[in-house]
Structure formats: structure tokens, C-alpha cells
Image (tube, grey):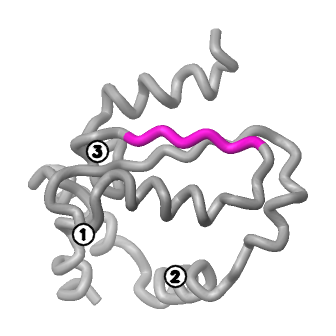
């Protein structure tokens, strides 16, 4: 479990500090619970219920050099996944991987703060 987790760390975060933090979370987690949760998330298609979502949705995603896709392809992937939503807004933060908040905390908070406070 931890060996596989270590292999995936560069996909999760750009920085050694971020990767160390993620690994510490993995070390502290219950492997069976993680496996169940990942299995459930990866095997459930939520697209049929997206048209029922009645609130605005914001998606924050990270992109950085060295990722297996370029920024437009990543954005297209997310656009396709959320196609059933009437109100969705995407925020791509450059220089970040999956854990955007670890790689680019200031940019993450700059996007998140107005969403949480309603623009105030």
C-alpha cells in the first residue's frame, strides 16, 4: 500500500514537502478504508444526477509541467465530466498537481475565498 502510494506522490504534489505531507497522511490512514472509498468513488457514475444539482459548482484543478496531459486537455477532461451541470465554473491553477492547496496555497486561497464568502 505505502509502496504504491510513494510511486504516486509526484502526481499528487510538485513539492517534496507536499509529498512528505501526503505520505504521512497515507501512513496514518486505514488501508481497508482507503481501498473501500477509492473503489466506491471509481466505480460510481454520478453523471445521471448532475442535472439535478441546483446550486453553482466551482471546480478547482491544478496543472503543471510534466503532467501526462497539457492544460487544454485537462480542462477538456473536466468539462466533459461536468457536462450535465447547468452552472459550473472551472479554476485552473498553474504550478500545482492534485493537492492544489499544498503546491499553490496562495493561489488556491485566492480562488476559494470569494467562493466561500460569496464574493465579499
Q: Secondary structure at mark 3?
A: helix
Is 106 above or below relative to 19? above
| Earlier residue among tags 3 and 1 | 1
Mark carried by residue 68: 1
| Earlier residue among tags 2 and 3 | 2
Q: Is residue 23 visible?
A: no
Mark carried by residue 110: none
Which stretch is magenta?
A: 87-92
> Quadrant location of the N terminus?
bottom left
Could you tell me which residue is drawn at 51 percent across and 30 percent down?
112
Could you tell me which residue is drawn at 74 percent across and 73 percent down?
46
Residue underneath mark 2: 38
Is 60 above or below relative to 66? above
Q: Which of labels 2 and 1 is toward the front?
A: 1
Residue underneath mark 3: 102
Could you tell me which residue is drawn at 15 percent across and 61 percent down?
66
- Name the residue at the top extreme: 120
Amino acid at each position: 500500500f505505502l509502496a504504491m502510494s510513494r510511486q504516486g506522490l509526484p502526481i499528487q504534489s510538485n513539492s517534496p514537502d507536499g509529498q512528505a505531507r501526503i505520505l504521512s497522511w497515507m501512513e496514518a490512514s486505514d488501508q481497508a478504508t482507503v481501498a473501500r472509498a477509492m473503489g466506491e468513488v471509481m466505480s460510481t457514475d454520478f453523471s445521471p444526477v448532475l442535472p439535478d444539482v441546483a446550486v453553482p459548482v466551482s471546480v478547482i484543478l491544478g496543472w503543471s509541467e510534466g503532467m501526462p496531459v497539457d492544460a487544454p486537455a485537462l480542462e477538456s477532461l473536466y468539462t466533459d465530466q461536468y457536462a450535465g451541470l447547468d452552472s459550473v465554473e472551472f479554476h485552473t491553477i498553474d504550478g500545482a498537481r492534485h493537492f492544489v492547496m499544498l503546491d499553490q496555497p496562495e493561489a488556491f486561497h485566492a480562488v476559494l475565498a470569494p467562493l466561500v464568502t460569496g464574493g465579499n
